[in-house]
Amino acid sequence: MDYKTNSIRPFIGAKDFEVSRSFYKELGFTEVVIDENLSFFGIGEQRGLYLQRYFVKEWVENSMIILSVDNIDECWKNLITKDLDSKYEGVKLIPIRDFEWGRECFVHDPSGVLLHYSEFNK
């Protein structure tokens, strides 16, 4: 690349936009409403995703996002205390797994997007 990039921000869809908005806020994202069909959910200044009031089952259920974390054990403890799988239909939490490259746990959002919380080997 011959230029500097500042961030990369995926767009994801939502089966029920209002439910997904609530879910991402509960995960700890900060919402910036763009319009009635689009919000930016950020963590920090340059990291985040765009959630849109748009749903194509095949696309959304094949969407995955990796969130790199410093401490997967603390992340997992935080996720399970939120009790997301009992609050939101379709949400599943998958415990930490060990891989050659690091450790990871997973969360399926209310629409089927798979969030990978990953701690990479140093």
Image (spheres, rainbow, N blue to C red):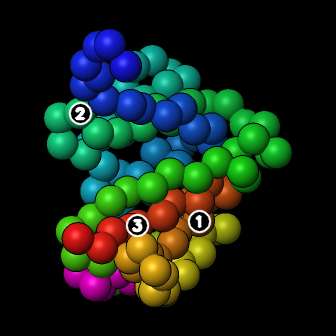
Q: Which residue is mark 1?
A: 108
Q: Which residue is mark 2?
A: 46
Q: Are marks 2 and 1 in contact (CB under 8 Å)?
A: no
Q: Amino acid at mark 2?
A: Gln
Which residue is found at the position 46% from the left and 45% from the top? 21
- Front residue of this view, candidates 84 and 5: 5
Which residue is found at the position 25% from the left and 19% from the top? 4
User: Which of the two discs, 2 and 1, sits closer to the camera?
Assistant: 2
Q: Mark 2 Cα within 10 Å, few/some/many (few <14, many 20+)?
A: few
* Mark seen at residue 117: 3
Q: Mark 1 Cα within 10 Å, few/some/many (few <14, many 20+)?
A: some
Majority secondary structure of magenta residues: helix
Q: Amino acid at mark 3?
A: Tyr
Per the model, the C-alpha gap separating discs 2 and 1 is 23 Å
- Front residue of this view, candidates 107 and 21: 107
Mark 2 or mark 3, earlier in chain: 2
Q: Residue furthest top?
A: 2
